[in-house]
Amino acid sequence: MKKGIHPDYDYVIFRDTSCGKDFRIRSTVKSSQTVVWEDGNTYPFVTLDISSASHPVNCP
């Protein structure tokens, strides 16, 4: 990859506010909020209204 043209791609904690589930994935999203994850490291934190954990299509 060319240097300097791609956004930073690193771990971010997302919280689905409709069910309270947290998950850590890599993303280019930016956030001014941070949270300490289970591994003891601090990551950017983003809340979501809905995710695959709470989407009606995935519910039994």
Image (spheres, rainbow, N blue to C red):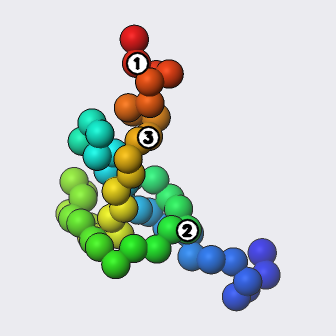
Kindly tell me whether residue 41 is visible in this rendering.
yes
Amino acid type shown at disc 2: Thr
Q: Which mark is residue 28?
A: 2
Left or right for 19, reference 9: left
- State which quadrant residue 55 falls in: top left
Kindly tell me whether residue 22 is visible in this rendering.
no
In which quadrant of the rendered image does the N terminus lie?
Answer: bottom right
Q: Residue shown at 34%/78% (left/top)?
A: 32
How busy is the neighbourhood of tag 1: few (under 14 within 10 Å), some, or many (20 plus)? Answer: few
Chain-order first, disc 2 or disc 3: 2
Left or right for 58, reference 19: right
In which quadrant of the rendered image does the C terminus lie?
Answer: top left
Q: Position of residue 49 (x, y in %)?
A: 38, 47
Q: Nearer the viewer, residue 20 or 22?
A: 20
Q: Residue shown at 79%/81% (left/top)?
A: 2
Is label 1 in a helix, a strand or a loop? loop
Is label 2 in a helix, a strand or a loop? loop
Residue topped by disc 1: 59
Q: Nearer the viewer, residue 15 or 13?
A: 15
Residue topped by disc 3: 51
Q: Position of residue 36 (x, y in %)?
A: 21, 65
Amino acid type shown at disc 3: Ser
* On screen, residue 49 above or below 5: above
Marks 3 and 1, how far apart at CA:
12 Å
